[in-house]
Amino acid sequence: MSKIVIAGAGYAGMMAAAYLDRQGIPFTLVNNHDYHYLTILLHEVAGGRDVGDKYKIPIKEVLRNDSSELVVATVTGIDRERRVLKTSEGEIGYDYLIYALGWVSEYFGIKGLKEYSLSITNLDSAVEIRRHIDEQFRLYKQDGDDRHLRIALGGAGLTGIELMGELLEYLPKLCRELDIPWEKVDVQCIEAMPTILPMVAEHLRPYVVETITKRGGKLRTNAKINEVTEGVIHLDGGEKVEAGTIVWTGGVRANPILSEAGFTVDRRGRAKVNAYLQSVDDEQIFVAGDSAWAEDENGRPYPPTAQNAEQMGPLAAKNILLRERRREMQPFKPRDWGTLCSLGSEVGVGSFLGVPIKGVMGALAKEGSKAKYLWELGGLRLAGNHAKEVVRI
Ligand code: NAD
């Protein structure tokens, strides 16, 4: 059997690994932690819903077969000629590689943004956002400077709005705990485009605006961030927003490892794959999840969503096995479950199987999607072990 290496234990990598593990097919999974987490829940950690440790799923709890190997290391590159994955712990040879390292923040070359903003890129960075906000509120108690109580989020896509929803639930509690008047807190989401959440149906967006505004948050549109200096966002037109906490939620791109390794990439750095998720540049490499530039039969690229990643991972693994057995590989034809955006723990908005939903139904659908994922990853055992931590129905 050829040596299969999986890079990354996000949705795509973890689902690929679970698929092979269940069949007792040997593989090596390389990840920079010994745990997996649900990326779509990071806003809950950053926004203070619960502590980060509760969101960790030990990888060894999912991979139970002795033939499955986990290497905890940071992937630093790919030498395609030698078929070697370069990592912080040394080189790992492969016959087949499933590349699933996910995304990094996209800063669009905006001056000072990377240096002076926080971002939700992994569990640690989400924990850091909450710690930073708590610290700022405590500093306000010491020096009374209102800027400590201003939180500015850059970008009103799903990440920005979901984080806003969490913060508007958590911060009033923090204010009560620290005896800070809630009216003094200013949470604003700054969006360059004329509208928020373009991926949510237009008729549902006023519900989002109303929910957030009623809770005391501000949604600003047609406000483009041009530059960030320490504690200050500079908008197009000259306005300055001084904030103790600045979080960039303005977009993502694939890890630069792909372009550095000479893959054909799109403008967001994703590697082009064929219908079978196999790199168009290298038939020994399959790319899955947010790193894959995959297109539907009409040539439209699939968006980098968790549900696509969950479906790509096992298919990439399956296609490697089919190829090994000289059988026909299967094309990627994902099921579209819809898009869900939580607005705190109790309400949400979006669509489920083509039906628009909002309010409590939106929150229930979102919680249901978490339980479904745990079930698919590790069956009843994993769902039973972790559902109480990550699913809040
Ligand atoms: P995004 O690209 O979807 O949204 C970023 C927003 O920032 C856009 O509205 C953009 O106009 C705005 N922006 C960009 N530059 C700006 C500037 N200079 N000034 C002000 N605003 C600016 O990014 P995201 O929300 O991080 O999402 C990334 C991907 O992850 C998406 O594919 C998304 O669907 C997915 N995601 C899904 C979920 C979910 O399913 N619940 C949650 C989070 C993210």
Image (cartoon, helix red, strand yellow):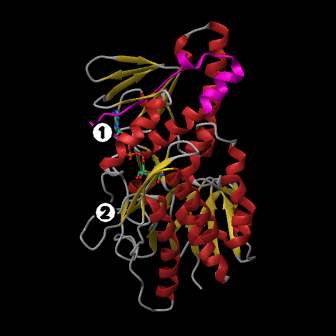
Q: Residue at x 31, y 32 (%)?
A: 221
Quadrant in the picture for the N terminus: bottom right
Provide residue 48's location: percent of width, then percent of height. 63, 37
Snapshot quadrant of residue 24: bottom right
Q: Disc 2 designates what residue?
A: 301
Q: Disc 1 designates what residue?
A: 195
Specify the amino acid type for callout 1.
Thr
Q: Does residue 82 appear in this view?
A: no
Q: Residue at x 71, y 66 (%)?
A: 382
Query: Is residue 183 rendered to the left or right of residue 135?
Result: left
CB contact under 8 Å: marks 2 and 1 = no
Label 2 sits on a secondary structure element that is: loop
Q: Is residue 157 above or below residue 69?
A: above
Q: Which numbered disc, 2 or 1, marks the residue that appears first in the sequence?
A: 1
On whether residue 356 falls in the magenta region, the answer is no
Snapshot quadrant of residue 10: bottom right
Quadrant in the picture for the C terminus: bottom right
Q: Is residue 352 above or below residue 144?
A: below
Provide residue 167's location: percent of width, then percent of height. 56, 33
Label 1 sits on a secondary structure element that is: loop
Snapshot quadrant of residue 328: bottom left
Provide residue 229's location: percent of width, then percent of height. 43, 20
Q: Residue at x 42, y 66 (%)?
A: 353
206 and 138: which one is in front? 206
Mark 2 → mark 1, Cα distance in angstroms: 22 Å
Q: Is residue 71 above or below residue 298?
A: above
Specify the amino acid type for callout 2.
Pro
154 and 26: which one is in front? 154
Task: Find the magenta span and give its range.
Answer: 170-196
Provide residue 246's location: percent of width, then percent of height. 49, 27
Q: Ligand 1 falls in which quarter?
A: top left
Q: Does residue 87 appear in this view?
A: yes
